Image (spheres, rainbow, N blue to C red):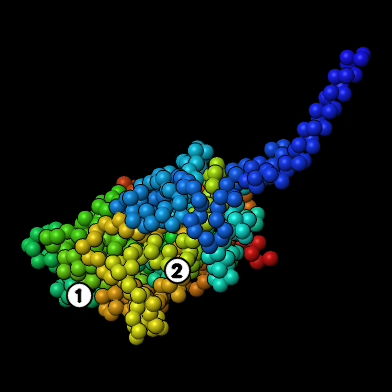
Amino acid sequence: MRRTLSALIACIILIAVFTTACSNNSNNVKDNEPKPEQAAGNTPTEPAAAETSDAVAPAGEFPIVKEKITLKVMAPENAGVENYATNLFTKELEEKTNIHLEWIMVPEKNVVEKLNLMLVSGDYPDILLGMGVNKTQEVVYGGQGAFLPMNDLIEKYSVETKKLMETLPLFKETITAPDGNIYSLPKVNQCFHCTMSQKMWLYEPWLTKLGLSMPTTTEEFYTVLKAFKEKDPNGNSKADEIPFMTSVTGWNSALDDFLMNAFIYNSKDPNAPGLLMRDGKVTAAYDKPEWKEGLQYLRRLFQEGLIAPESFTQDKNQLLAVGNNPDAVLLGSSPGGFQGEFLQLGDVNDKRWLGYKAVPALKGPAGVQLSAYSPMEYYTGQFVIMKGNKYPEASFRLADMFYDWDITMRLSRGVEGKNWKKAESGDMGIDGNPAKWAPIPNTDEKIQNDYWNELGPINLSNEFRLSQKNNGPEDLEVLLYQATNDSYAPYKPDVSILVPPLVFNEEQSAEIAGLQKTIDDYRKEMLARFVTGDADLDKDWDRYVSTLKDMSLERYLSIYQEAYDKTKH
């Protein structure tokens, strides 16, 4: 008993000494080391964040970290950028921030597929950059913890994001998920010509040579394409003209993006692709009789050899090779957001691109004449911090700096003195106000390695875009501004036909994610089959509509309707 009592007293003394030592040294514990209560799991703060927070410089100060760190970044490839890893801007960024970027590049045409596979696998990079994460994915994967919320990071470390929240209407509301968290940062793109980017471009010198006028109806467009095919407008005595060609990876370059709007409103808004409002009800365009009429028109063009078969399979680079053909002009027309979707801009081939003019919204046989309109100015999902990222604070600070005017200019427009210059006194901008900057054409550069070409979250506000110097009739931005204003804005639909931005709960978002991919993949497949004749429009249309129903199209639309109805209460 005496031995037991002695041992007990000894233990009490040891505990007292240990407690006193811990108490005396509590003020010497570094802030960036886990506290005892954190180790015990009494706080939701992740150890990784606690370990690194003190190493991150305060908001607006550089370098962002004292000791160099590495972040794994998943991003889409860009045909105009040689190599993001060796890019001059990447190197400058590392010098400024002490952050090294390790790139995981995804082929442009496989971005959606690769993003979905990565999210399902759980094998995450540190950052998603420019991958176009949609709101549904934000809700689902943010709720699961795969995407880290940035609310506290914005509060503590933001300079530029806070400015946008204060100055841009609906910016904060647009990027906030239903649960109140901000899981991604957007690209701000207040771009007038981008709001009506489902355009068509036609080679005007061929019209002039053949004595034709710019078409205004679908029938006139057919007549023009037929003349391009049969009357040797390039004058080389060869039947090598391609009246109409496109690709599957360009910006609004799909076969139906422009032409279907002469039959039924066909929006490619990623938040509601192929959907429209009718009498307060969300409905699909692609199962309507008017869609079938549009397919019949496209089938007619294809059957008569006016649409190139490669349009259903080739990527943008293959289309560019046709548009840039050095021997003769081969391409009569092509859809897309601008001429650079199908040929090189600049002085190449005697400034060939300037010959391609915007085809105005065409009037269909039933009098439909619409321009697809997407008023959204914020492209969400451009920057996401992933679960497992050891440096969330440094990652956020990196993204926040991209919104700065000078960084946006450097990232998106290139090197001052080489790619752009400051405007001079008296220079006027696109909107008629004093200009701030002017591009320097680099016509010899097919691929550059000086800047990122608009990758990621940047601030292309109206102030930025319209302050570009108006360089006259060969200025791309001026041409796009005028083409949109003259050929598409007059046919912009009433907003009542547009499905507004909607907020879905986690269950709805998860269900939509699966249904949307299944339905959209099938719609694209059948569009190609109907147009090429692999499926018969007369015999197979009812089966197509029935299959859409079997794929739960009605359920898909009802989820949108539920979310829409909530906006009215």
Q: Is residue 306 visible?
A: no
Q: Is residue 100 visible?
A: yes
Image side of residue 489 versus residue 23, left or right: left
The residue at 69%/38% (across/down) is 39
Q: x, y percentage for residue 66?
A: 50, 51
Instruction: Determine which residue is flagged by label 1.
Output: 212
The residue at 76%/36% (across/down) is 21
In the image, 488 versus 298, the foreground residue is: 488
Assess disc 2: are there few (<14), some (14-19) or many (≥20) residues with their C-alpha within 10 Å of its C-alpha. Answer: some
Taking 264 as reference, is 103 above or below it?
above
- Image quadrant of residue 325? bottom left
Query: Is label 1 in a helix, a strand or a loop?
Result: loop
Query: Is label 2 in a helix, a strand or a loop?
Result: helix
* Figure quadrant of the C terminus: bottom right
Picture disc at residue 405: 2
Image side of residue 122 versus residue 104, left or right: right
Rounded to the nearest angstrom, the CA distance separating label 2 from label 1 is 46 Å
- Image quadrant of residue 51? top right
Image side of residue 31 versus residue 412, left or right: right
Q: Amino acid at mark 2?
A: Trp
Q: Amino acid at mark 1?
A: Leu
Quick one: which residue is furthest to the right in this view? 1
Q: x, y percentage for residue 378?
A: 50, 64
Q: x, y percentage for residue 364?
A: 36, 69
